[in-house]
Amino acid sequence: MSGGNPFGAEATLSTQGGEYKYFRLGKLSDDGIGHIEKLPYSIRVLLEACLRNVDGFVVNEEDVTKLAAWNAKNVAQDEVPFKPGRVVLQDFTGVPAVVDLAALRSAMVRMGGDPQKINPLVPCDLVIDHSVQVDEFASRLALEHNVEREFERNRERYQFLRWGQQAFENFRVIPPATGIVHQVNLEYLAKVVLTRDGVAFPDSLVGTDSHTTMINGLGVVGWGVGGIEAEAVMLGQPIYMLTPEVVGFKLSGRLPEGSTATDLVLTVTQMLRAHGVVGKFVEYFGPGLQQMSLPDRATLANMAPEYGATMGFFPVDDETLAYLRRTGRTEAEIDLVERYYKSQGMFHTADSADPEFTSTLELDLGTVVSSMAGPKRPQDRILLTDMQRQWRKDLSETFGKSAPSAPVTVQDNGSSSQITDGAVVISAITSCTNTSNPSVMVAAGLVARNARAKGLTRKPWVKTSLAPGSRVVTDYLEKSGLNEDLDALGFQTVGYGCTTCIGNSGPLPPPVSKAVSEGDLVAAAVLSGNRNFEGRINQQVKANYLASPPLVVAYAIAGTTDIDLSQDPLGQDADGNDVFLKDIWPTQQEIAQTIENSLNAEMFAKQYGHATEGPPEWQQITGSEGDLFQWEDSSTYIQEPPFFVDMPAQPPAIASINGARCLVMVGNSVTTDHISPAGAIKPDAPAGLFLQANGVEIKDFNSYGSRRGNDRVMTRGTFGNIRLRNLLAPGTEGGVTTYLPTGEQMSIYDASLKYKETGTPLVVLAGSEYGTGSSRDWAAKGTYLLGIRAVIAVSYERIHRSNLVGMGVLPLEFPAGQDRESLGLDGSETFNIAITDDLKPGQDVEVTATKADGSEVKLTTRCRIDTPVEVEYYRNGGILHTVLRDLAKA
């Protein structure tokens, strides 16, 4: 960042903390390069990064001039090399990332290189938040006991992270029981302006979790990437992306009484999914910004993956500064942010001219009404007033029940209850999406207080939980006394982590589990999360609904989705009078006053002042030391992956894929949860059998997510989601396929081994939105290790497409307007895919599918390797292979 900038853009910024150099965007306008003042704020951040990093090699002058000339109505398909300022990770994706770095070091030694060359060059923070499970609930000891179980299950993983913390520079671990990565990032890690070597520049990042976008609410550019892309950034590589379109979303008015930020984000998600924003930036603007709190903005930004966008960005303004002050940032840090953004012409005010956008949408916040989303997708919004009607429709049409199931008895401590379809067996206040927002958390507490005052409580079959995204939430709930009311309704704190939102809901109580199984019930979960894909929340729960925290409390009281909460009573008070939801719902003034009286900056300073210390269990863990990790073949958690073992110094030429057979054939909206599940491991699944064969008892299986450091477990779990419907094995659910040479049905993993024995490459046939959902790189790693060399889909979700390329798997798209059904493909064909060493981004690729009778279906697919750099990644077998070869040469 030092040296002469070819544009002469260096300038000096004086702040309370001293003087900094910065690279002034206005210099480009002064010289007639672009119209900076018309650019979306998000594009200006990308432009500054290019301007600051021009070196004539990775970033060229032409990259700057092209991006400065960004044309909203005709966005050029130019490649942008973006160098983020830092990386954040969570432990499910972070552990395999550190495993890869350790494996790269081992490979570097084998290639005769210096292992110290494998070292993060930008600051990296790993927050351990994905490992705590809801084993115990509705108990004052739930938190203590769940933390104990977490450390029992994950000690080996945590020892490995302790090793990584001492082995790598620029690598910091935030221990368990601190909070959720995105909330910790929002409240503590993010600076909005970074400084390095005397240079000030906009904070920016990538994260190994799709909801990294939550930080966009603070005016920080950032999005989720796969672990392999994040590792490349750690090692100094830029993110290469095509110049994005930017969709402007105009907000006006303010939220009405009874509506929450959750209702708003579900409304926006539905609108943007319909508009189509995959691969695009969304930037919010309009007079509504002046009325919107930063936590509400963060809620909107958080769910960018659910509406399909790369980002959901808010510009820096006075509310940004106020939030930094409210969360305990120093006055020097806040002064730097204000002076920097104003000096760059990037500080938004009510008088700021609107940027030019590729397209726009508009929403009057006053029209937002109480909503939920489900039962399987976050974009399927349901008005609360329509919920009962929609539930009954879904019971028949989505879950195939022509009539409701007969009631089943749940026995519990001498008493019994009757439940049937729609029984809410999980009510979870969970996820950074909502627990980062005091307005909805306080609303939940006030609903609990008002319900308690009227004698209402949760139904006995409901598993209730509260998992805040930071300990500050506990502080303000305790100061307001609302924790006692939540406790009384069963919402005791169970942990500080993602829990139910990512499938760590823990088992249902045995009596409830038995009733659901014996009655074959369509049980329901209501959670304040951001994802509700089938099979994700709990293996016994088929219908999953996203809702605001106060509605989560309400449904715990109701105990069923077969109720109209806008008209039906929740229960009766001590005098037998009906109590309705409206009777216990707080006003906006009550919520605001409670927040004013119970939340202050000192709470953030106290909690984050020792964020890296962790609980006593963490402090007692010791790991191995040294530059190289000592792999142990007996470990069932940490193994050296095979990606770089025996890797040749030079990659082979790109060549056609011939004689390929289909291993998996699926429909639309197959998620990364379907491809690489994160939740429980079934004992009779290939991964479960492997663990038992290696001496692991079923009670110690932990989850797929916790075992992502072991390729032997994860490959066996790929396509192992219990709700996966592989159309090659009709009538089955789970990781089953048909081994085509014999027609025998078997596990997908076992079939892959048989194909491997004969050297047969494999393909996947898929519908639209393939790979939607989490940013998990194991959905691509597992795909590759099964022997799959190409995926042919109608369309891809952004991160998974990138991850496939990053693992050397060829992503192809069916011809426009066609799919496997219209082409008459049934998956039994043999596929020849014609590519050569002069592969070009986005080129046509001819595929010939030969049927058993010798007839052929020829189709011209589109190669979804999108940039020249991605071609090199594919040529080398993946991103990390490319980086390793480059570093070894150096």
Image: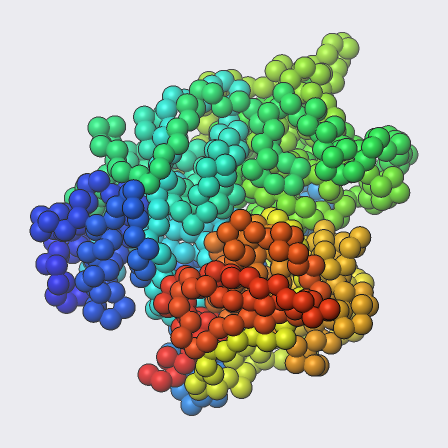
Which quadrant of the rendered structure holds the N terminus?
Answer: bottom left
Residue 885 visible: yes
Which quadrant of the rendered structure holds the C terminus?
Answer: bottom left
User: In percent of the image, x 28 and y 36: which residue is there?
Assistant: 317
Q: Nearer the viewer, residue 139 or 209?
A: 209
Q: Nearer the viewer, residue 413 or 637?
A: 637
Q: Position of residue 253 (x, y in %)?
A: 38, 21
Q: In the rendered image of this protein, does residue 99 appear above or below residue 516?
A: below
For the rendered model, the colour scheme is: rainbow
User: In percent of the image, x 50 and y 39: which residue is there?
Assistant: 273
User: In percent of the image, x 26 and y 33: which residue is there?
Assistant: 354
Q: Is residue 626 left or right of residue 574?
A: left
Q: Position of residue 203 (x, y in %)?
A: 31, 51
Q: Nearer the viewer, residue 883 or 191?
A: 883
Q: Is residue 812 left or right of residue 512?
A: left
Q: Position of residue 428 (x, y in %)?
A: 64, 38
The image shows a total of numbered marks equal to 0
**Residue 581 occupies quadrant:** top right
Q: Is residue 552 left or right of residue 393?
A: left
**Residue 322 occupies quadrant:** top left
Q: Nearer the viewer, residue 424 or 194?
A: 424
User: In percent of the image, x 61 and y 29: which residue is there?
Assistant: 382
Q: Position of residue 371 (x, y in %)?
A: 57, 27
Q: In the rendered image of this protein, does residue 108 appear above or below residue 286?
A: below
Q: In the rendered image of this protein, does residue 109 appear above or below residue 143?
A: below
- Residue farthest along the bottom direction in this orientation: 112
Residue 788 visible: no
Q: In the rendered image of this protein, does residue 331 appear above or below residue 675?
A: above
